[in-house]
Amino acid sequence: MAIMEFLTRNQIQTTTMILVDSGTATVANLIDRNKNTQYVTEGYESNTSTIISIEFGQPTVLSNILIQNHNLLDFRIFYDSVTANSIDIVSGNSSTSYYKYINSITVSSLQLQMDTTIVTAQEKQVGQFIANERNFQFERNPSIKNFKPVIDRFQVQHIMADGGVVLHNIRDKYQTKLKFEFITETFYNQLLSLYETGSPIYYVPFPTTSSWLGNAYEMVWSKDFDFKYSTNVGSIGYSGQITLEETPNA
């Protein structure tokens, strides 16, 4: 099983950073933190390639590229122009989610060249385009009993005159509790440093380069930092719990 990890916030923050050949009306869907809404090209349902280019405006450190809910069969990822530096060339893909980790690089721009789609004669579609840097990978995953993910559904309930119920589902949000026992001082210090920033982070439960389920969430650590020595012998390690809750959509 892949090891969980924390990443920084998506470095693609505004639509003004994004250049496309078509489909400008749906560009915001690339970064709205809702993978069910998609950027869709216009006039590129054939095998004609088209590019999404991200212009960062200043040197930016990246180590992770995540693409959620896409329909791309063949695509390429470059940085600092589509001919300069290749991060990955994907051919014959059948998965609708893409995860890529590389050694950290400093870039001024990032390009996604979309060549063909899994189902032929479709417009190219991308739900979320995430480019960021790994904070750290967990030293190990919590045990299954200490991993408690929940899809929290925010809804409005109406009780009708005959006693029936009508539900209006507003949004589903991910949250989880991760309890650890006997972690090392190194992992303890990583968690404490992250907690002290108070900043949103990306949480990837099970990153993998093959058959990735596309689960990655911008979250905040919402409760206290309660890690302490697991026993009276400090060298044994630390125990505590992390509570993560998903941030609002952009």
Image (tube, rainbow, N blue to C red):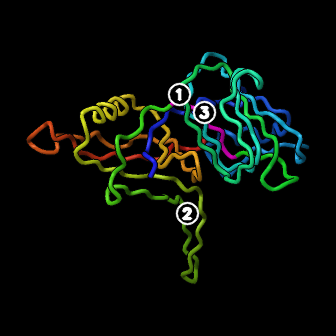
Q: CA distance from mark 3 to mark 1?
A: 13 Å
Q: CA distance from mark 2 to mark 1?
A: 45 Å
Q: Which residue is mark 2?
A: 156
Callout in the foreground (3, 1): 1
Q: Amino acid at mark 3?
A: Ala
Q: CA distance from mark 2 to mark 3?
A: 34 Å
Q: Amino acid at mark 2?
A: Val
Does the magenta portion include 131?
Answer: yes
Give the camera-side residue of 186 and 175: 186
Callout in the foreground (2, 1): 1
Residue 237 in the image, given as x and y percentages of width and height: 19, 40
Against 219, residue 185 (above or below) is above
Against 10, residue 215 (above or below) is below
- Direction from residue 142 to residue 75 in the image, left or right: right
Where disc 1 sits, the SS reads strand
Does the magenta portion include 78?
Answer: no
Marks 2 and 1, the one that precedes in the sequence: 1
The image quadrant that residue 25 belongs to is top right
Over which residues does the magenta segment extend? 127-133
Q: Which residue is mark 3?
A: 131
Marks 2 and 3, the one that precedes in the sequence: 3
Residue 87 in the image, given as x and y percentages of width and height: 65, 30
Against 133, residue 245 (above or below) is below
Instruction: Write the residue at 12% across / 44% down.
Output: 231
- Direction from residue 155 to residue 177 in the image, left or right: left
The secondary structure that dominates the magenta segment is strand
Q: Which residue is mark 1?
A: 103
> Residue 124: which disc?
none
Marks 3 and 1, the one that precedes in the sequence: 1
